[in-house]
């Protein structure tokens, strides 16, 4: 089904949205009104802290204060021993905040910052951050010399938060709730509570841990949750002492200025735990956004869909990652059809437009290791920035960073960042598309329609209200194509990437020339909804029939005062999702009652068969409503 236009209730003048960075302290008196941060228009940049930049000062170097851990020998300043620390730290990130802002990044996801076991297991130190020793303290290797490991007293952490928020960039903390550390020199699962001994796997009198062997059957639900992964001490989430500890620790991080959480190993803890965790974290900071790692999730895997829809958080979209990588690598046949196959499953998600999308990460070879063609990497990044979801870029991608040793497998997918050029092709592509994402809401909220597809050529459009984007990609030889239906109004278009102009006539484009490796992105700007309060309503769970659309009716004038003829129309996103932004002026700071209805039926109006939903609007700001169709 195509896009359904909104009901015309939008104001005559509006301002295009801009990127919103930083976090604001919540006033308890208004916390009731505050809703989850709108993350759909964010651009995430994922940094392995140890491999980004060493911000050690000259004075510290001269004084030999560059090895800040409890044990010497874990740091390799020559960058030859891949399992050791290489010296990246928080000051290095602070030093590059204007670079990140220039790139167009609006949120930084940092590898875990918790204090780690400061030791080696075989030839590896915990530079990755997933062998936690104390969830309430910082890894001293990431701090300036002499700085406190305490969250509240760390000057380095405070400076990082201030620098990011000052640049309009949000901070995402990587959270590990499933496990602590493996057996290192006879020590396994030794964890502290802000320096005070808490638990020990080998002396587990309080039953903080499960004591099962390694996972042998990855399809077995019991093993996924109770057994060990890679020898890591696995927490017993049924223990209320553990739950209280981990939640209190993350609350302390949130109080420092963390804006969102990336949650590790989602599938290795039960849904009920994540529901409790998400609820308590959002009770502490109601506008918190969370997304989790359900490793290698697929949209046809019912368990991963359950976690995406019922844990209170979004997930990383491994399915689309595979689709994009297969489309260019040829490891699976079908070319660009691989991507359309994944997108055809979007209706199984309640929030497909909030899935966090990526083309590579720290657990797989970088894109260039499997597709060693910089032009195809550029095409993949165009896809990442223009398809649905919240795009996440792995550090250094914009500089074509790669090490193909051993096929680019871990640890060679984590090389040191060495270049910071701003005039490279991919850096500039990202700059332009980041700006487009901030201003054209079709990319953050809109529907997706395929317009032309072969294994080598892919054309699709995105639509939301009067915002439109058309994307054309060619990974094959030079070609010329006709697009019968673009979904765009007639007129001249200008490519965001090249400045090339193109005419739309009778809704189509004839003779679109696409050189080998070309990407074209055409944009039509609309007028964004604005008002003292803007409510973003997303509805799932009702599959419309041809000729039907959905609308929002309610007790206030902005929703038609229960007059069905003046209900506020929703926009089609996919077969399971409709969305709209409602500007509230007269009803701001008031109580509204509302429900959803179906339009286009020949007989009686079809409304949700539930008692009316209700909400007390704030005086100003944006509020977010995620709803499921109600039928008793």
Image (spheres, rainbow, N blue to C red):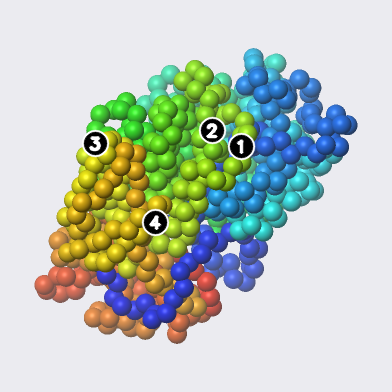
| Callouts 1 and 2 close, C-beta under 8 Å | yes
Q: Nearer the viewer's eye, disc 2 or disc 4? A: 4
Give SS at disc 3: loop
Real-space Cα distance between discs 2 and 4? 27 Å
Which numbered tag is attached to residue 499? 4
Q: Residue 621 appears at what percent x and percent y?
A: 52, 71
For disc 1, the marked residue is 419
Give SS at disc 2: loop
For disc 2, the marked residue is 401
Residue 83: image quadrant is top right
Q: Label 4: how many residues lie within 10 Å, few (<14), some (14-19) or many (20+)? A: few
Give SS at disc 1: loop
Q: Label 3: how many residues lie within 10 Å, few (<14), some (14-19) or many (20+)? A: some
For disc 3, the marked residue is 455
User: In percent of the image, x 88 and y 31: which residue is there?
Assistant: 63
Q: Residue 538 appears at what percent x and percent y?
A: 36, 62
Q: Residue 212 appears at what percent x and percent y?
A: 52, 21
């Amino acid at each position: 089904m195509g896009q359904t236009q909104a009901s015309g209730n939008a104001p005559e003048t509006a301002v295009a949205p801009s990127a919103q960075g930083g976090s604001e302290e919540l006033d308890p008196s208004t916390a009731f009104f505050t809703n989850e941060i709108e993350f759909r228009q964010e651009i995430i940049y994922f940094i392995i802290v140890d491999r980004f930049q060493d911000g050690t000062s000259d004075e510290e170097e001269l004084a030999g204060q560059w090895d800040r851990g409890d044990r010497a020998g874990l740091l390799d300043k020559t960058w030859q021993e891949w399992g050791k620390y290489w010296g990246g730290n928080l000051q290095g990130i602070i030093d590059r905040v204007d670079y990140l802002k220039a790139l167009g990044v609006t949120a930084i996801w940092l590898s875990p910052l918790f204090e780690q076991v400061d030791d080696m297991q075989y030839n590896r130190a915990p530079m990755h951050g997933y062998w936690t020793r104390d969830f309430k303290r910082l890894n001293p290797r990431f701090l300036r010399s002499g700085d406190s490991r305490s969250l509240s007293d760390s000057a380095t952490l405070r400076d990082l938060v201030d620098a990011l928020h000052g640049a309009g960039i949000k901070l995402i903390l990587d959270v590990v709730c499933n496990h602590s550390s493996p057996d290192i020199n006879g020590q396994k699962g030794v964890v502290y509570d802000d320096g005070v001994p808490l638990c020990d796997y080998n002396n587990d009198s309080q039953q903080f841990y499960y004591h099962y062997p390694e996972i042998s059957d990855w399809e077995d639900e019991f093993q996924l949750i109770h057994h060990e992964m890679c020898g890591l001490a696995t927490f017993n989430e049924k223990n209320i002492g553990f739950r209280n500890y981990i939640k209190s620790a993350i609350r302390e991080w949130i109080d420092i200025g963390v804006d969102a959480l990336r949650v590790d190993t989602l599938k290795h803890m039960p849904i009920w735990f994540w529901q409790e965790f998400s609820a308590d974290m959002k009770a502490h900071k109601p506008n918190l956004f969370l997304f989790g790692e359900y490793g290698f999730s697929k949209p046809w895997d019912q368990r991963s869909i359950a976690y995406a829809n019922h844990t209170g958080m979004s997930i990383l979209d491994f399915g689309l990652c595979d689709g994009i990588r297969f489309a260019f690598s040829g490891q699976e046949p079908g070319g660009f059809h691989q991507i359309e196959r994944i997108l055809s499953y979007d209706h199984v998600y309640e929030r497909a437009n909030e899935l966090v999308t990526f083309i590579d990460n720290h657990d797989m070879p970088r894109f260039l290791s499997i597709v060693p063609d910089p032009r195809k990497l550029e095409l993949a990044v165009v896809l990442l920035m223009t398809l649905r979801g919240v795009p996440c870029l792995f550090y250094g991608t914009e500089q074509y960073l790669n090490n193909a040793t051993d096929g680019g497998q871990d640890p060679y997918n984590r090389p040191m960042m060495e270049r910071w050029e701003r005039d490279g092709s991919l850096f500039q592509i990202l700059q332009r598309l980041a700006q487009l994402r901030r201003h054209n809401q079709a990319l953050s909220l809109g529907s997706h329609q395929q317009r032309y597809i072969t294994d080598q050529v892919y054309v699709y459009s995105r639509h939301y209200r009067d915002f439109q984007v058309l994307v054309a990609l060619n990974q094959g030889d030079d070609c010329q194509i006709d697009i019968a239906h673009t979904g765009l109004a007639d007129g001249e278009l200008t490519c965001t990437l090249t400045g090339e102009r193109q005419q739309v006539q009778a809704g189509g484009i004839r003779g679109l020339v696409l050189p080998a490796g070309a990407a074209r992105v055409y944009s039509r700007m609309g007028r964004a909804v604005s008002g003292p309060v803007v409510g973003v309503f997303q509805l799932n769970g009702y599959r419309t029939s041809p000729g039907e659309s959905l609308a929002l009716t309610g007790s206030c004038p902005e929703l038609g005062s229960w007059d069905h003829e003046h209900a506020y129309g929703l926009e089609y996103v996919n077969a399971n999702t409709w969305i709209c932004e409602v500007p509230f002026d007269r009803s701001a700071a008031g109580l509204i009652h509302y429900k959803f209805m179906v339009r286009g039926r020949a007989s009686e109006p079809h409304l949700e068969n539930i008692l009316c939903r209700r909400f007390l609007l704030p005086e100003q700001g944006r509020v977010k409503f995620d709803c499921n169709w109600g039928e008793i």
